[in-house]
């Protein structure tokens, strides 16, 4: 986000952190805290989220919502459950095929 705002030469290791970049990357302040580097951001020179929204154009980087860890966890659990359900259905289908074959073989004898 810093490079998108300040150019490709911007280096976070040698230049001060950009409060605007942190605000845009983390969707503003939640519960009075920045998403990252809360104590390192110069709050006096950092615009508020409403100020950023007011001056956002098509050429500026968008304000991204802060990722929610609980949402990511729920999605990961749901994906695992979906995989497990698919695997269980495949096993049940194979078992049903085997039952059908055995019943046909028993009828022939």
Image (cartoon, rainbow, N blue to C red):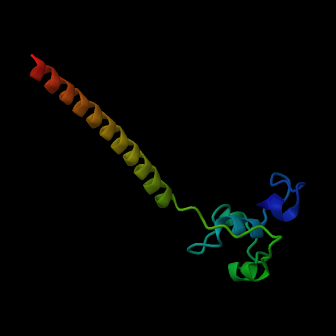
Which x, y percent locates residue 25?
A: 69, 64
Which x, y percent locates residue 22?
A: 71, 65
Relative to 88, is 26 on the left or the right? right
Q: Which of 76 and 32 is in front in this view?
A: 76
Relative to 78, is 6 on the left or the right? right
What's the residue at 66%, 67% (across, down)? 64
Say above or below: 30 vs 15: below
Q: Nearer the viewer, residue 39 or 94?
A: 94
Q: In which quarter of the image is residue 97?
A: top left
Which x, y percent locates residue 62?
A: 73, 69
Q: In the displayed image of the protein, which residue is found farthest to the top? A: 109
Q: Nearer the viewer, residue 82 or 2?
A: 82
Q: Quadrant of residue 107?
A: top left
Q: Quadrant of residue 27?
A: bottom right
Which x, y percent locates residue 40?
A: 72, 64
What's the residue at 14%, 26% (across, down)? 103
Q: Give the position of the N terminus as an image quadrant.
A: bottom right
């Amino acid at each position: 986000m810093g490079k998108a705002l300040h150019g490709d030469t911007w280096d976070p290791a040698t230049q001060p952190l950009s409060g605007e970049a942190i605000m845009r990357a983390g969707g503003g302040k939640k519960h009075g805290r920045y998403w990252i580097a809360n104590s390192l951001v110069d709050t006096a020179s950092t615009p508020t989220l409403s100020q950023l929204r007011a001056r956002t154009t098509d050429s500026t980087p968008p304000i991204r919502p802060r990722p929610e860890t609980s949402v990511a966890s729920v999605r990961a659990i749901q994906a695992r459950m979906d995989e497990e359900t698919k695997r269980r259905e495949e096993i049940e289908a194979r078992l049903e095929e085997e039952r059908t074959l055995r019943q046909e073989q028993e009828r022939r004898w």
